[in-house]
Amino acid sequence: MSNKKEPEIKQGPVSDPSSWVDKHGDYLYRYALMRVRNREAAENLVQETFLAALTARKGFTGRSTERTWMVGILKHKVIDTYRKSFREKSISEIQTDEEQTVDSFYDAVGNPGKYPKDWLPDPEKLLSSKEFWEVLKGCMAKLPERTAAAFSMRELDDLDTAEICKELSISPTNLWVILHRARLQLRECLERNWFEKKEDNV
Amino acid sequence: MSNWEEETKIPLITSCKQAARLVSIAIERRLTVRETLTMNIHLWMCKTCTRYRNQIRLLRQAFTRHEEALGNTPASECDCLNAQSKQRIKDALAKSR
């Protein structure tokens, strides 16, 4: 605890709040943008995060980096947003809303022209491709709002069924249906917008 | 809904629809012995669903590394706060100090 701090930090573990936006703003913004649906919402989340960090800065022990600490705050803010969007509508409404998310995957059966492609990429190459991330983000943005919310908690934050169900007040069965649909839709979107177009690249 | 709950009575030979569900559920909870068997028999026979499973795996792998990707994006990209927004946030911060 009483470790020597790095020389540039003189007034406790937190750096000067007026430097935060330049230091962490873009990262937090991208982090938020991955999880919410538009720039405005992401921007607001970043601002709220900084304001909350300002209030809580005395409690920051410096055990993690400043950025990790802020990401932790942002994560909670994002989940609050999700919770709100789930509270607005009942789960049965959500499901009817998303009923038309046609599982075209199933059409592929018996229709070789529409078979899922063998994505077979070199995962390293794929995951380090900036373009791939752009397409993936675009595909996530096309998911229905609450589907995207549940899916983000599961796949981006790696929360388990119990945690997600508690936050969103839904049943495990509901959650699994939502996640399955999200996967089908994302798969299809990626196939159309990346793998069919970029076969040479991957 | 019964397809999602633990179910022991699903037939060993099943449709792609059911198999794809099992592939997805397997990520969320432990499948029963019966479910595992059903899924594997189907995957063994069905190229489509096997590919689907591989695609889902790749997707999941991608998501575990998204934070890395966030850090990699160069500052020149448009995925950044613009100067105006930055100023707005700075002002908000300054005001509440």
Image (tube, grey):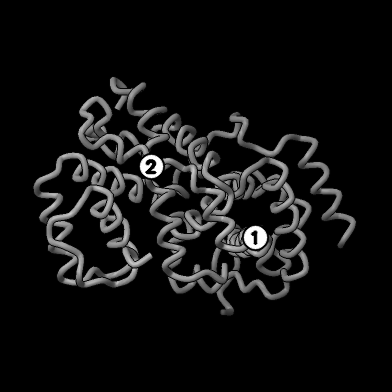
- Where is residue B28 shown, x and y percent of the image? 34, 65
- The residue labelled by disc 2 is A103
Q: Residues within 10 Å of mark 2 (few under 14, many from 20)?
A: some
Residue for badge 1: A89
Task: Return the disc, 2 or 1, that comes first in the chain's sequence.
Answer: 1
Q: How many marks?
A: 2
Residue displayed at 29% across by 72% down: B6
Instruction: Answer above or below: position of A7 versus A43.
Output: below
- Looking at the image, which residue sits at the far right? B95
* Element under disc 2: loop
Badge 1 amino acid: Lys
Q: Is residue A136 visible?
A: yes
- Chain of the residue that carries numbered disc 2 in the rendered image: A
Q: Relative to residue B62, is residue B69 drawn left or right?
A: right
The quadrant in which the N terminus of chain A is found is bottom right
Locate residue B86 relative to residue A198 in the image: left or right.
Answer: right
Q: Is residue B76 above or below residue A46?
A: above
Question: Could you tell me which residue is drawn at 59 percent across and 61 percent down?
Answer: A75
Residue depicted at 68% across the width and 64% down the height: A14
Element under label 1?
A: loop
